[in-house]
Image: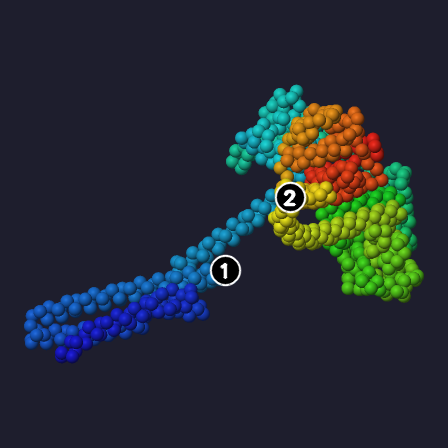
Amino acid sequence: MAKLFKDVPHALATAGRRLRRAVDAPRRPGAPLMIGTPRPSVVATAGARAPLPGLVSPGRALLLAIAVLASMVLLAGWAGAGGFGEPLSLLVGCLLLMVVLLTTTLLVLDRIGCWLSQRFDILCQAAAAWDSSDALELAQLLGEDSVGRLPWGLRRAALALDRLTLALHLARQAFVAIAEHGDTWESWVGRDGRLRWVSRSVLAITGYSPAECLAMADYPYPLIHPEDHERFERMRAGESGAGDELRVRTRSGETRQVRLSWRWVRGESGEELGLRLSVVDLGRRPAQPRPLPRASESLPEPTAGPLGHWEWSLDEDSLSWSDEIYPIFGLDPREFRVSYPAMLERIFPEDRPRVVAALVSALNGDAPYRVEHRILCSDGTVRHVLKEGRTERDADGAPRRLYGIVQDITDSGQARQALSRINRLYAVLCEVNKAMVGERDPQALFGRVCRIIVDHGDLQLAWIGTADAEGAWLAPAAVAGMAAGCVRDRRFSLADAGAGSEPGVEALLSGATRVHQDLAAEEAGQPWRQRAAEWGLRSLVALPLRQDGEVVACLVVHSWQAGYFSADMIQLLEALADDVSFALQALAQERRRRQAENELQRLHTEFEVRVAERTRALQAANGELEAFSYSVSHDLRAPLRRIDGFSRLLQEQHGGQLSAVGHDYLGRIRRSSQRMGQLIDDLLKLSQIGRQALQPAEVCLSTLAAAVLEELRQAEPGRALEVHIESGLQVRADARLMRIVLENLLGNAWKFSAGRPGARVRFGRDERDGERVLYVLDNGAGFDERYVDRLFKPFQRLHSASEFEGTGIGLATVQRIILRHGGRIWAEGRVGEGATFFFMLP
């Protein structure tokens, strides 16, 4: 007993774990959790679907285990009541109560889960049947269940709604087709006075579109002439009316006379549904058909070709022709028996539906019988005829017989047909020109051109061929049309060109248009002719396509009809080929332009790389130049200073011990060292000019020139010199560098005019070739113009140092400064007459 009592908590824990595992067990995707087993009736009704997994068997096993444990607890409680005392009996009673409650809860949950799983299973099957369009059949199987009837009812409602929607759509289409037929301007105005619908004929009569009319708040008053508004009010006050004439105003301000009919439309219960208005433009009203006489009456004389009479008795189902009709059809009246089926056999196949429709319309009284069509004569030729007729009816309005005329209008029909073909080719030209604007690839352009020719030109085949890279074969690059299989995936040899070769090859090699009006009548034998005959192609035109003056492709168009291409059509096709050639030329130029841009970009990138390399080299050279300048400034100046210093001390302290020749030597040494120092200073200045950054600003050169000349006067107060400085010489430049320019130019003028009687210096400006030029003029020693190119080179002097002192660096420095500012400098002069230095700044 003690052991059994100890095992009670362990048994309860084990039962709880089993319940948790059962609840948390993984389920099949889409399957609901079920506690209990579905009823067999539901499973049978659900068809072949297996019952959903649940906790039916484990749950009942668990309940059985709990019942056993409860019995054991009761036994333990009885034993406790006898030997374990009162508290244990109380505990056993509580545990027994908990077991009973837990058992009841599990049973209730089991039943609820079973019911929910059955309904969910039925609903899932109905939804699956709905998706597979089999909902009605399965819903009948599930009809005993309320949940199963739900999708079935929804499906029936959806199908009924679809049928009503389709019927409404068809009724609307029929209404629009009837209302839009003809030239009558129809409209519907609702009870509230707002326009509900208007036919497209309103645009042809008034110039206003249906959308604009629907936007009018007081339609149709804006369209009716103001003077007829009151009349319209009186007219619409009645129940209905017909034949009343009014005036309308078009968008362009024109007044047109129309005939108005109106009627109030009412429903079955008499309520007003709206007002229907019908307007006929009297200016556009078709003329009444000319009455046709009976067969025995005289008919008009033919005006465009032979004319004959015909009569068809519907009561006897007999068709009779006059003798004039047989020659029109190319028939012998002795061999041909006239009947309606035989007559239909002679009508061109493509025209038969239109002829039958016109005949049915005439019999129904919808329209007079008038139709143009083609006929096939016995000799295989095609002719155009015009048929007109009148319907005779009995007292009940039923048709009894038709009679009328047939007239040969082949000449005028062929003219209209030729005009229609030319118009179609004009449409092809227009569409091709549009395509040329948007296409940037020759292959895509070829494809669009071929499709446009077939779609808009009513031709059966169009293809563009190009030669391969070796120039040995012609292959189609683009093909379109119903007979595209005639040339697709084929190649034509360019080596066997000659008489009878493929027309595209001839056009490509000769550069001329090739025309074949009837391939069937020409000599057969070539494979391309046989293949064209297999596809029913009778005529073709092959045209060359050029680029850069050379033939690069060919355009070939085919027709099923012999003699299809007239001279005017061939001319239009040649114009089309010229347009395509122009597009090829434009695309080639665009391609070359892109290649040039790519090459320019490559060169630009390469140039940037080179500039970067040169920049690095220049930076290295500048670094070396700076090192050299440092060396010149320190290493070379120090010995020169020592030479000049010791020479001066030798002259001052020991001059008495030296002879005149010694003093002359010392003077030369000092002057040479001083000149060397000046050369070093000038070289440093020259090298620094190229490295220093410009600081442009507004500079008055007149003021700078006056300051420089004042310094020169202070250095030589006794000099007699006439100076003229023009005022207002303003430039934008680096003020420090411009001072160096003026110091060198004015210094040279001061130096080279020394000792000259009447010496003068002038600084001003002049106009040369429409540009402002500044100049420094003197009447000094001048120079030989043969050596003018040596003036601006470093260390190049045209005068000896004994005549005029200097280093030969000044003018080179001036030129470098002017060039750094983007200007230029030049000189003019004569020996003994002076010199003029011109410079120009941007």
**x and y percent of residue 633 in the render?**
62, 47
Q: Name the residue at 23% across, 71% down.
A: 13
How far separated are the C-alphas under marks 2 and 1?
130 Å
Identity, as a three-letter code, of the amino acid under mark 2? His
372 sits left or right of 438 in the view: right
Q: Front-most of 767 and 715?
A: 715
Q: In which quadrant of the rendered view does residue 793 lie?
A: top right
Q: Which mark is residue 131?
A: 1
- Location of the C terminus by quadrant is top right
Around disc 2, counting alpha carbons within 10 Å, would you say few (fewer than 14), some (14 to 19), or many (20 or more)?
few
Helix, strand or loop status at disc 2: loop
Q: In which quadrant of the rendered view does residue 197 lie?
A: top right
Image height of 542 relative to 246, above or below: below
**x and y percent of residue 460 in the render?**
79, 55
Q: Name the residue at 39% across, 62% down.
A: 120
Q: How is the structure coloured here? A: rainbow
Q: Front-most of 802 and 483?
A: 802
Task: For residue 366, say whether it is visible.
Answer: no
Q: Front-most of 252 and 224?
A: 252
Q: Name the residue at 42% across, 58% down.
A: 149
Identity, as a three-letter code, of the amino acid under mark 1? Asp
Q: In which quadrant of the rendered view does residue 397 lie?
A: top right
742 sits left or right of 51 in the view: right
**x and y percent of residue 802 in the render?**
77, 39
Q: Are marks 2 and 1 in contact (CB under 8 Å)?
A: no
Task: For residue 635, say whether it is visible.
Answer: yes
Q: Earlier in the sequence, mark 2 or mark 1?
A: 1
Q: Name the residue at 27% across, 71% down.
A: 17
Q: Which residue is the site of mark 2?
A: 654
- Location of the N terminus by quadrant is bottom left
Helix, strand or loop status at disc 1: helix
